[in-house]
């Protein structure tokens, strides 16, 4: 499978894009957007390098977009530079136009999920499907604003971002995953860029999603049980069209299910793509489990209510 890294000049600076996969122009490209405190590699490599995900990668072009200034080795923002969440949305549009994609399937985590949601509402004809992990489409309320102000005084930037990325249970356990990401953020040479992206996300605007103002494409919402954005994902689910929305709450997944449960997320992603009408061979799935899980997944797209997809084993 070919892999190519591109640097695209934009009015907001150089945009880093990684493209790999089949280059199949008859199918939508799978376009990912990472969360704050991460880049495309740290956010998505575990998922897209997972063995069973290769069947998807072989049949679709996969495009990883780094928010401006967030990629490994990025130049430091100049003094006084103020990024905004419109800039990453522009990055998605620039990528879409630069590579002449017909349509995309968006996969976003946290801030990336918000950015792809915003892009989809503005460009509905460009997006065939959305996978939104840990999405929060609301602006922060006054209580959240006050809590963040206090956190800014008492916690380091890395601790603030880790609390955004991971569950309290994971933070208390101080797992190897937590330690790895804490060290990576604390030692990042582009730490000022990360801080500015974090502040920009904290100042996000409400997307005003409701039943009569929602996505025109199928959506799969994903969140870990006890994850920081569990309530926000549940609220978002209540506002979306139940005939085109599936909701996957993953047990024992923590705040980053794409890192901790790549097998289950890959399987759910395959069913989501199949529900959109794109065939994808299921790998190493027992017949009885396949029948059960296919029935559950398909019910999300046949006029039924959203379901909580529970995986066994």
Image: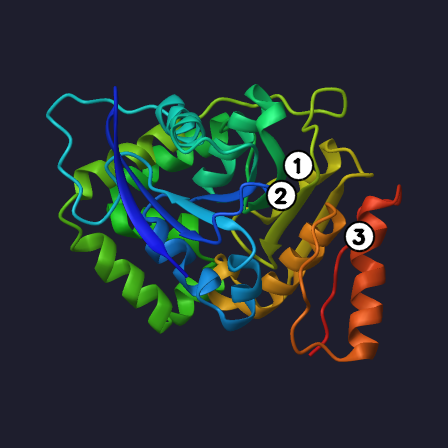
Tell me the residue that label 3 is attached to: 307
Q: Label 2 to label 3, Cα distance in Å? A: 14 Å
Residue at position x 18%, y 38% in the image: 192
Residue at position x 22%, y 61% in the image: 183
Tell me: residue 130, above or below residue 263. Answer: above
Q: Which element is circle 1 on?
A: helix
Whole-percent x, y for residue 102 in the image: 55, 32
Q: Label 1 to label 2, Cα distance in Å? A: 5 Å
One can see residue 35 in this view: no
> Are discs 1 and 2 less than 8 Å apart at CB?
yes
Of callouts 1 and 3, which one flags the residue occurring earlier in the amino acid sequence? 1
Tell me: residue 248, above or below residue 25. Answer: below
Q: Left or right: where does residue 278 sit relative to residue 139?
A: right
Tell me the residue that label 2 is attached to: 233
Whole-percent x, y for residue 85 in the image: 39, 26
For label 2, count other residues whose C-alpha is less than 10 Å away and answer few (under 14), some (14-19) or many (20+).
Answer: many
Q: Which element is circle 2 on?
A: helix
Whole-percent x, y for residue 87 in the image: 35, 24
Quarter of the image where one finds residue 151: top left
Question: Which one is closest to the eye, mark 2 or mark 3?
Answer: 3
Tell me the residue that label 1 is attached to: 236
Front residue of 96/59: it is 59
Tell me: residue 50, above or below residue 93. Answer: below
> Are discs 2 and 3 less than 8 Å apart at CB?
no
Front residue of 170/97: it is 97
Q: Which element is circle 3 on?
A: loop
For label 3, count other residues whose C-alpha is less than 10 Å away and answer few (under 14), some (14-19) or many (20+).
Answer: some
Residue at position x 60%, y 43% in the image: 27
Quarter of the image where one finds residue 120: top right
Whole-percent x, y for residue 243 in the image: 82, 39
> Are discs 1 and 3 less than 8 Å apart at CB?
no
């Amino acid at each position: 499978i070919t892999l190519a890294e591109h640097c695209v000049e934009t009015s907001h600076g150089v945009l880093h894009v990684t493209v790999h996969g089949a280059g199949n122009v008859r199918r939508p490209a799978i376009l990912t957007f990472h969360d704050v405190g991460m880049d495309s590699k740290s956010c998505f490599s575990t998922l897209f390098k997972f063995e069973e995900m290769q069947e998807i990668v072989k049949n679709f072009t996969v495009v990883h977009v780094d928010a401006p200034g967030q990629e490994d080795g990025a130049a430091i923002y100049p003094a006084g530079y103020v990024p905004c969440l419109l800039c990453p949305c522009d990055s998605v549009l620039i990528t879409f136009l630069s590579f002449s994609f017909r349509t995309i399937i968006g996969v976003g985590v946290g801030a990336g999920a918000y950015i792809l949601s915003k892009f989809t509402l503005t460009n509905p004809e460009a997006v065939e499907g959305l996978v939104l992990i840990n999405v929060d489409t609301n602006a922060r309320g006054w209580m959240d604003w006050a809590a963040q102000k206090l956190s800014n005084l008492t916690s380091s930037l890395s601790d603030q971002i880790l609390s955004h990325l991971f569950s309290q249970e994971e933070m208390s356990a101080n797992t190897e995953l937590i330690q790895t990401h804490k060290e990576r953020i604390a030692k990042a040479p582009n730490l000022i860029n990360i801080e500015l992206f974090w502040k920009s996300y904290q100042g996000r605007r409400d997307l005003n999603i409701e039943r009569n103002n929602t996505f025109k494409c199928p959506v799969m919402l994903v969140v870990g049980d006890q994850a920081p954005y569990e309530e926000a994902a549940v609220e978002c689910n209540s506002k979306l069209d139940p005939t085109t929305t599936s909701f996957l709450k993953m047990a024992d997944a923590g705040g980053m299910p794409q890192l901790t449960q790549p097998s289950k997320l890959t399987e759910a992603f395959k069913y989501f793509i199949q529900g959109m009408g794109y065939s994808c061979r299921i790998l190493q799935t027992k017949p009885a489990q396949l029948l059960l899980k296919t029935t559950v997944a398909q019910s999300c797209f046949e006029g039924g209510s959203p379901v909580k997809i529970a995986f066994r084993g």
